[in-house]
Image (cartoon, rainbow, N blue to C red):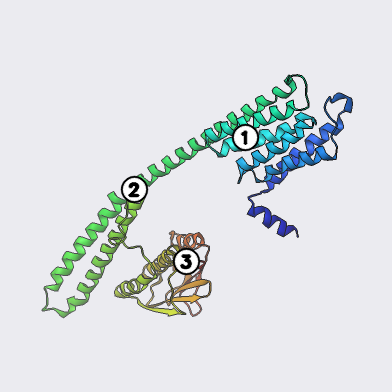
Amino acid sequence: MGTVALAGARRWGIGRGDLLLTGALLILPLAAVFALPWHWLEDRQLDALGITLLVLATMPVLVRRRYPIQALLFCVAVQMAYHALNYTHEVMLPVVVVLIYTVSLATSRTSTLAMVGISVAGVLVSASVPRDESIGAEVISPLGWFVVAAVGGQAMRLHRALLTETSERRVAEERLRIARDLHDVLAHHIVVINAHAGVAAHLLDERTDDPALAPISQSLHTVADASSGALAELRTTLDVLRGNEVDADRHPTPDLAGLARLVAVTTAVGVQVELRIKGTSRPLPPAVEITLYRIAQEALTNVVKHAHARQALVQLEYDVGEVRLEVTDDGRGSSDSGSTAGYGIAGMNERAQSVGGQLVTGAGRYGGFRVAATVPTPGAR
């Protein structure tokens, strides 16, 4: 029963802090009123009706975050009846102050001024109903707290906006710095690799008299093609970091359709890779496809760099509600592939977790190394 109640509260945006604040605003004023001698209070003694109105006026505090204006309007309407019956006026003050502060924090300055005006008018009109004389200071003076709450909420809203703007500016500056470093260092070296590999491959292609040079030429062509692809992806990354629009036709987002090309490139550099697809292939959310592609790419990179493997297997399995990717090899296993010197495995793990999945790495069933990612696929298109 308690679990159902908490679930319902979350749907309304009610947190534990809201429950505690509402309880405090309800219990503490009541305790103060009942603790004081009745002859100290000039207003009407709280009875069942007064307590009911106090509870009704306090309940909107629970939903003030999601419905700030509606919560304040409901509270003011109930308080008008409460004050008109001449119950203890001060008891209601903390509730209205909290709601006005929330409205000021969550809405515009115009909305805040309008709601403060409505609140003041409602309290003044209702408080004057049972009185023949003019409204006294005991009614007017608490209205100053309304202004204090409104000003405090606006100040906090501006402070939060300033912090957000400062944080966003620092992030933008850091992104630009990273983009400059990538362009000046990494892009330059990739261009050099691509140019030299292309020239060397072209020169070897002209040596048709020596068949032994053909495998070398093929390897150089692979290096040139791979560096061209890396340079294209790097340019896309630089565009994203700089906030420029990315032409999807010129720089396509990597997806699972690119696994075949990834396998072919890895095979071309000396590791025989097989791609197996189980289950019915279906389009997945872009974030899932990018994540699985990058995990496969990093796993195959580790196979080439660390595993000293001759063969590798990339297996993609579609299941109901999830997709599993597994990359295995027949290399040396975790002694090299599982090295913590780099960031490959950590990066794969972070990618899997970013889409709600999990990554398992370790020794393969028949030796070598194994990388297995399982990613849920809700809302597959």
211 up-or-down from 283: above or below? below
Badge nearest the viewer, 2 or 1: 1
Q: Which mark is residue 101?
A: 1
On the image, which quarter does residue 298 sit in? bottom left
Residue 67 in percent (x, y) is at 61, 45
Mark 3 or 2, nearer chain start: 2
State left or right for residue 200 relative to residue 62: left
Disc 1 residue type? Tyr
Q: Are marks 2 and 1 in contact (CB under 8 Å)?
A: no
Disc 3 residue type? Gly
Residue 323 in percent (x, y) is at 49, 72
Seen at 74% across and 20% down, the residue is 136
The C terminus - image quarter: bottom left
Q: Which residue is mark 3?
A: 338
On the image, which quarter does residue 277 sit in? bottom left
Nearer to the camera, 255 or 104: 104
